[in-house]
Image (cartoon, coloured by chain):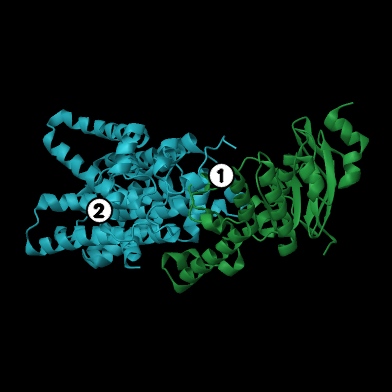
C-alpha cells in the first residue's frame, strides 16, 4: 500500500501536436481535500478525463493506492475506486432522484444479483431491490435530498442537481472522489451549503477529494493543498495559501 | 397494496384475459378462421413490439433491422421443424425444438449486431441494422432450393391451426415475463441509465458493453421466436415478407405505443395489425400498396400529438390515468417503486422540458424553476 491515495507520475496527453497536459505529478494523501485550479483551458478537466479513463494518457501513469490504473476502461476505474462528477451536469434526467442513486449502487458487492435471478424473480432480487432502496435513501439524507426522492432528476433546481450528482458518485463507494467545478453557477448560499457537505463527506466517509474549482474563495476555504495548472503544466503546488500567493500563479490569473 | 400489485401485472392480465376469452371461444368453435389468423398475427406483432421496445425504448438505440432477426428465426426454425416433424410428429416437441434453434440463431445474430452498436450512434446504427436486415433477407432469397428454398420460399409444416394462436399468446406472455422482469430490476435500471446518459453511466461504473449486448441479444432471441411462430402460421416462408417495410412497421408500433411503454406497445401491436388486415381486405389490387402510407400518417400524428402544446392540454385533461385516478381511492401514490409501469420515455421528456406542463405539478412552486433561472 502506497502512502498516497492518488499518485500521478509525469502524466501527459497530447492531441496531435498539442500537449494538453504535460508532466503532471500529483500526490494526494488519504483524507485530503485537494484542489486543482488554473485559468480556462489549462487542462484541468483533461486531467480528470485521464484519471477516469475517458482518455488514455500518452505519457506517464497514475496509481490509486499503489495500483496502476492506466489503460483500464472507465467502468473498471470506477470499480477500482475513482468516482467523478461532471462540469456540465450529467444526471439520468428521466429517472427519479432515488433511482439515480440506485444506479450508483449497481456494482456494490452487497447488492449482487445476477440477471437470471432478476428475470426469474428469485428472492435475492427482491432482497437486493429493497436494500438498495434503503441505502439510496440513506445516502440522499446526507445531502438533504431524501424528501425529493421521487422527483424526476431534471425537475430539481440547479444546486440540488449538483448535489445529486455527488450523491450518485458517492454511492459507488469511491476511495477518491473527483469533483469537476462543483460550485459552478451556484449562489453564495448554495456554495456554503456545498462546502459543508464536502467537509461532512470527508469526516463521515473518510473519503479523499480532488476538486476543480474557479471560485478561489471556495478553494481557499476548503482545500488543504492545491496544484495550479496553466497551459497543461504545473506552475505551482503546495499549501493552498502559499500556492495562491505564488507570483507565477498571480501572473497566470491576473496577468503581468 | 392491492392497487400496486394490480398495476404491476397489468400487461399479464391484459394478455391473459384476451388469451382466455379467445381460447374458450375457440373450443366452443365460435372462432372464425380469419379471426384466428388475425390473432396469430397480433400475437406475433406483440412479441416483436415488446422485444423491439427493449432496444428502442429502453436501451435507446434505433434499430430498424428487427425483421432480419425474425427472418433468421423463421428460416432456421422452419428448416428444423421441416426436418423434425417427420421424425417427432407435428407436435409440441418439434415446435419447442425449432423455437430453441430459431431463437438461438437469432440471438447469435443479435450479438453480432450488438458489437457495432457499441461504437455506432443514432443514424449510423440505424443504417447498420437496416443493412443487416436486408443482407439476411437477400441471403435467404438467393439460397439454393434444397437448403432454404430460394425465391420460392421454404415450405414449412403447419401446426394445428386451432391451437396455434394459443401457443402464440403464451409466447407473448413469456416475452413479457422476461423483458418486463429484466427492465424492472437493477439491470433494467442500468439499461435505462445508458439510454439517459451513456457517459455518466460509464463513469458510474455501469458496464455499457455488457448491457448493450444483453439488450440486443434478448430482443433478437424473442424476434427469433416470433419468426419461428410465423413460419408455423404460413404454408411457406418467403423472404419478401421480411423487407424494410416490415421493420418500419414494428418501429411504428413501438413509437405509437409510446417508447418504453410495454402496455402501449401491446395495444398498438393489436391495433396496427387489425387496421392492416382490414385495409388489405378492403383495398383492391394495386391499391393495397396504399396501406404503407398508413405508417407515415401514424408517425406524423404521434409526433404532432406528443409535441403540440394545444393537444398537450387536451391530453393532460382527458387521459386514461386521470380516468383511473377518479375511480380509485389511492389518488397519489407518489412512491416511485410502485410506478414501474411508467418508466419515463423520451417522448415524455419533451413534455417535461416544456414549461406549460408544470402548472398542474404539486411540487411546482417548491422545486421547479426553469434551468436558466438561478
* Secondary structure under the numbered disc 1 in the rendered image: loop
- Locate the C terminus of chain B by quadrant: top right
- Locate the N terminus of chain B by quadrant: bottom left
Give the quadrant of residue B347.
Answer: top left
Q: Colour of chain A?
A: green
The answer to whether residue A9 of the structure is visible from this angle is yes
Q: Residue at x 12, y 49 (%)?
A: B34
Coordinates of residue B219 in the picture (x, y in percent): 40, 52
Q: Is residue B301 above or below residue A71?
A: above
Q: Which chain is cyan?
A: B
Protein chain holding label 1: A
Q: In front here: A199 or B260?
A: A199
Q: In front here: B18 or B90?
A: B18
Comparing marks 2 and 1, which lies closer to the viewer?
Answer: 1
Q: In front here: A36 or B138?
A: A36
Mark 2 crowdedness (10 Å alpha carbons): few <14, some 14-19, many ≥20: many
Give the quadrant of residue B258.
Answer: top left
Mark 1 crowdedness (10 Å alpha carbons): few <14, some 14-19, many ≥20: some
Protein chain holding label 2: B
Name the side, left or right, on which B56 lies relative to B174.
right
Coordinates of residue A247 in the picture (x, y in percent): 93, 35
Residue extending furthest top? A256
Name the side, left or right, on which A31 lies relative to B130.
right
Residue A157's disc is 1
Q: Residue at x 91, y 34 (%)?
A: A248
Cα separation between marks 2 and 1: 45 Å
Q: Residue at x 56, y 67 (%)?
A: A111
Residue extending furthest bottom? A123
Name the side, left or right, on which A62 lies relative to B261.
right
Residue bearing the label numbered 2: B43
The answer to whether residue B231 of the structure is visible from this angle is no
Amino acid at each position: 500500500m502506497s502512502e498516497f491515495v492518488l499518485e500521478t507520475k509525469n502524466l501527459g496527453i497530447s492531441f496531435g501536436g498539442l500537449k494538453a497536459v504535460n508532466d503532471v505529478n500529483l500526490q494526494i494523501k488519504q483524507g485530503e481535500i485537494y484542489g486543482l485550479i488554473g485559468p480556462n483551458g489549462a487542462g484541468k478537466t483533461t486531467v480528470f478525463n485521464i484519471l477516469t479513463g475517458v482518455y488514455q494518457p500518452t505519457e506517464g501513469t497514475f496509481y490509486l493506492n499503489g495500483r496502476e490504473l492506466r489503460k483500464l476502461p472507465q467502468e473498471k476505474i470506477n470499480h477500482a475506486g475513482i468516482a467523478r462528477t461532471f462540469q456540465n451536469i450529467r444526471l439520468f434526467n428521466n429517472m427519479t432522484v432515488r433511482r439515480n442513486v440506485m444506479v450508483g449502487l449497481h456494482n456494490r458487492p452487497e447488492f449482487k444479483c445476477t440477471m437470471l435471478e432478476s428475470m426469474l424473480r428469485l428472492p435475492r432480487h427482491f432482497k437486493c431491490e429493497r436494500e438498495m432502496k434503503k441505502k439510496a435513501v440513506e445516502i440522499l439524507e446526507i445531502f438533504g435530498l431524501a424528501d425529493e426522492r421521487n422527483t424526476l432528476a431534471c425537475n430539481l433546481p440547479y444546486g440540488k442537481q449538483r448535489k445529486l450528482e455527488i450523491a450518485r458518485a458517492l454511492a459507488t463507494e469511491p476511495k477518491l472522489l473527483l469533483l469537476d467545478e462543483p460550485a459552478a453557477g451556484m449562489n453564495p448560499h448554495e456554495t456554503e451549503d456545498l462546502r459543508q457537505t464536502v467537509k461532512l463527506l470527508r469526516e463521515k466517509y473518510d473519503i479523499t477529494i480532488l476538486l476543480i474549482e474557479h471560485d478561489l474563495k471556495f478553494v481557499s476555504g476548503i482545500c488543504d493543498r492545491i496544484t495550479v495548472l496553466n497551459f497543461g503544466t504545473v506552475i505551482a503546488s503546495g499549501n493552498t495559501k502559499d500556492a495562491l500567493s505564488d507570483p507565477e500563479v498571480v501572473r497566470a490569473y491576473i496577468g503581468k | 397494496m392491492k392497487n400496486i400489485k394490480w398495476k404491476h401485472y397489468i400487461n399479464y392480465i391484459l394478455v391473459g384475459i384476451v388469451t382466455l376469452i379467445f381460447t374458450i371461444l375457440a373450443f366452443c368453435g365460435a372462432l372464425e378462421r380469419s379471426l384466428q389468423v388475425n390473432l396469430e398475427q397480433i400475437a406475433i406483432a406483440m412479441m416483436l413490439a415488446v422485444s423491439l421496445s427493449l432496444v428502442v425504448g429502453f436501451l435507446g438505440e434505433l434499430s430498424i433491422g428487427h425483421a432480419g432477426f425474425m427472418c433468421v428465426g423463421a428460416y432456421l426454425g422452419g428448416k428444423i421443424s421441416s426436418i423434425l416433424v417427420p421424425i417427432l410428429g407435428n407436435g409440441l416437441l418439434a415446435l419447442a425444438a425449432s423455437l430453441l434453434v430459431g431463437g438461438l440463431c437469432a440471438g447469435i445474430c443479435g450479438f453480432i449486431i450488438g458489437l457495432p452498436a457499441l461504437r455506432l450512434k443514432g443514424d449510423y446504427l440505424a443504417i447498420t441494422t437496416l443493412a443487416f436486415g436486408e443482407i439476411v433477407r437477400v441471403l435467404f432469397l438467393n439460397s439454393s432450393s434444397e437448403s432454404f428454398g430460394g425465391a420460392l420460399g421454404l415450405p414449412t409444416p403447419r401446426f394445428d391451426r386451432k391451437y396455434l394462436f394459443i401457443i402464440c399468446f403464451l409466447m407473448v406472455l413469456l416475452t413479457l415475463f422476461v423483458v418486463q422482469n429484466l427492465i424492472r430490476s437493477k439491470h433494467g435500471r442500468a439499461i435505462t441509465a445508458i439510454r439517459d446518459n451513456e457517459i455518466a453511466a460509464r463513469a458510474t461504473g455501469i458496464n455499457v458493453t455488457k448491457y448493450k449486448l444483453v439488450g440486443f441479444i434478448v430482443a433478437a432471441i424473442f424476434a427469433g421466436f416470433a419468426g419461428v411462430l410465423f413460419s408455423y402460421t404460413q404454408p411457406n416462408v418467403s423472404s419478401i415478407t421480411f423487407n424494410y417495410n416490415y421493420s418500419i412497421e414494428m418501429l411504428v408500433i413501438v413509437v405509437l405505443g409510446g417508447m418504453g411503454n410495454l402496455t402501449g406497445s401491446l395495444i398498438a401491436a393489436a391495433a396496427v395489425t387489425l387496421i392492416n388486415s382490414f385495409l388489405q381486405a378492403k383495398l383492391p389490387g394495386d391499391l393495397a400498396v396504399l396501406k404503407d402510407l398508413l405508417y407515415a400518417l401514424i408517425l406524423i400524428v404521434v409526433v404532432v400529438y406528443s409535441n403540440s402544446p394545444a393537444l398537450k392540454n387536451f391530453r393532460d385533461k382527458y387521459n386514461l390515468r386521470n380516468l383511473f385516478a377518479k375511480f380509485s381511492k389511492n389518488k397519489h401514490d407518489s412512491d416511485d417503486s410502485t410506478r414501474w409501469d411508467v418508466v419515463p420515455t423520451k417522448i415524455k421528456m419533451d413534455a417535461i422540458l416544456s414549461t406549460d406542463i408544470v402548472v398542474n405539478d404539486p411540487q411546482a412552486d417548491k422545486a421547479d424553476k426553469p434551468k436558466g433561472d438561478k
